[in-house]
Image (cartoon, grey):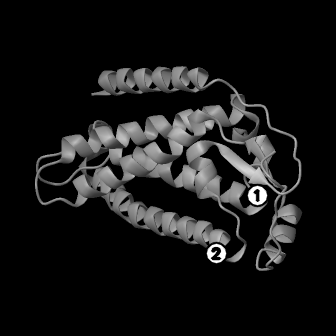
Amino acid sequence: MQGNRYPVRVWDLGVRVFHWSLLVLLTGSWLTGTSEDDWMEVHQWLGISVLTLVLSRVAWGFVGSETARFGHFIRGRRAVVTYLRGVFSFRVEHNRVGHNPAGGWSVLLLLGLLVAQAVTGLFSNDDVLFDGPLSGWAGKGLSDVITGVHYFLFNVLWVAIAVHIVAVLAYLVFKRDNLITPMITGVKSYKEPVVAPRLHSPWWAALILVLIFAVLVWGLGQAT
């Protein structure tokens, strides 16, 4: 206990690395995808890295730490509606460990968009020099359609990310609930005692990441 605060470790290292690595990779994807220079090979590998991260996070959502598991933060419609009704109140919620009901569904939305964005990239082409590793499987016509979807999803994804950032800042300003620092340190302070969640070793998350990356690279190599 620190003064009248109770620090609790709520996020494991794997979740935190996923969160910030994803930000770096998406920024790199945006820069390489919109550059007038030929960065498409780098863009492709950034996309494969994003897909690796997201699939690893999905796996961690089933076998990882308590606060990382989907079963911990995915709630039904009633819980989400009840939460949203009170979200604009100025009452600070100190005892919520992990994602709130609305945040849980936003996590699923972002993961779904990321998977769709990365997978469509594998089938896309730039009509000049670059073809995605699976574009040949789709044929030129379908590949062109998927490329259009890829560009569209990229804009949708950034809108979703912008909404996420605005929500985090709103929590900080209006509800005085700092969600940023815990995602860096893993520790969040509570006004009242809470039960600390069970966190797993980050080495398991690293192992899952390496295995998924190896399978993806091998599979794409076999497909091309």
Disc 2 packing (10 Å; few <14; some 14–19; many ≥20): few
- Residue 58 lies left or right of residue 10; in this view the side is left
- Report the front residue among 31 and 149: 31
Q: Residue at x 70, y 69 (%)?
A: 176
Q: Which residue is mark 1?
A: 100
Residue 191 lies, in percent from the top left, at 84, 57
Image coordinates for residue 158, horizontal then vertical, percent:
44, 65
Residue 148 to residue 16: above or below: below
**193 or 156: which is nearer to us?**
193
Residue 14 position in % (x across, y down): 57, 34
Q: Which mark is residue 48?
A: none
Q: For the point 35% across and 43% down, which residue is it?
A: 47
Res. 97 visible in picture: yes
Q: What kind of element bears circle 1? A: loop
The residue lying at 50 percent from left, 27 percent from top is: 209
Q: Amino acid at mark 2?
A: Val
What is the three-letter code of the residue carrying label 1?
Asn
